[in-house]
Image (cartoon, rainbow, N blue to C red):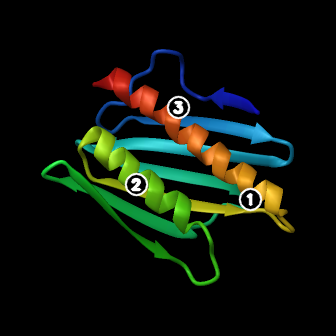
Amino acid sequence: MATRASDRAGVRLTANSEVCREITKGRLTLKLTARRIGNDLLIVITGGEAHIGAVGAGNTCSGLASSSVITMPGHRDDRIAKDAAELLAKKFDCNCAVVVGVHYDEITPQEIKDVMIMSNSLISEMEVVLRTAE
């Protein structure tokens, strides 16, 4: 898998700044864009024919993280959105919205697995960027 960062090394994600990451495997390319909105996070993950398939919202209360997800009819982006929103909200003690829209025609079961792995990799990379900003 090839990963490309559109930000310079060492760039920190501060209030109202934006950082992008991209990862490719075969015909699949996913892009993650992150923006701080005050202390909160907005994450957008797209691939193929970009759209809004699911929106996950995560928050913490007394150290416990929770999340909710809204999935557009006929879409299957909910697992990525919900899991990422809860993980980032817990790790950074903030409100987090994750918008996901990945669509590839005739995607295979293996490519679906690859999209899940690639999205997790992008989220992990973003965690590093966010940690250095703290």
Callout 1–callout 2 Cβ contact below 8 Å: no
Front in this rendered view, residue 56 or 36: 56
The quarter in which the C terminus is drawn is top left
Q: Residue furthest bottom?
A: 73
Q: Amino acid at mark 2?
A: Ala
Badge 1 local density, few (<14 within 10 Å), some, or many (20+)? some
Residue in view at x 53 percent, y 67 percent = 78
Between the residue at mark 1 and the residue at mark 2, the CA separation in whole angstroms equals: 20 Å
Residue 23, position in %: x, y? 69, 38
Q: Amino acid at mark 3?
A: Glu
- Residue 80 occupies quadrant: bottom right
At x 37%, y 45%, the residue is 88
**Quadrant where the N terminus is found in the figure:** top right
Locate residue 82: give its quadrant. Answer: bottom left
- Outermost residue on the left side: it is 62
| Amino acid at dot 1 | Ile
Q: Is residue 101 left or right of residue 1?
A: left
Per the rendering, the mark at residue 85 is 2
> Can you tell which mark lies on residue 112?
1
The residue carrying pointer 2 sits among few (fewer than 14), some (14 to 19) or many (20 or more) residues within 10 Å by Cα, namely many
Secondary-structure class at tag 1? helix
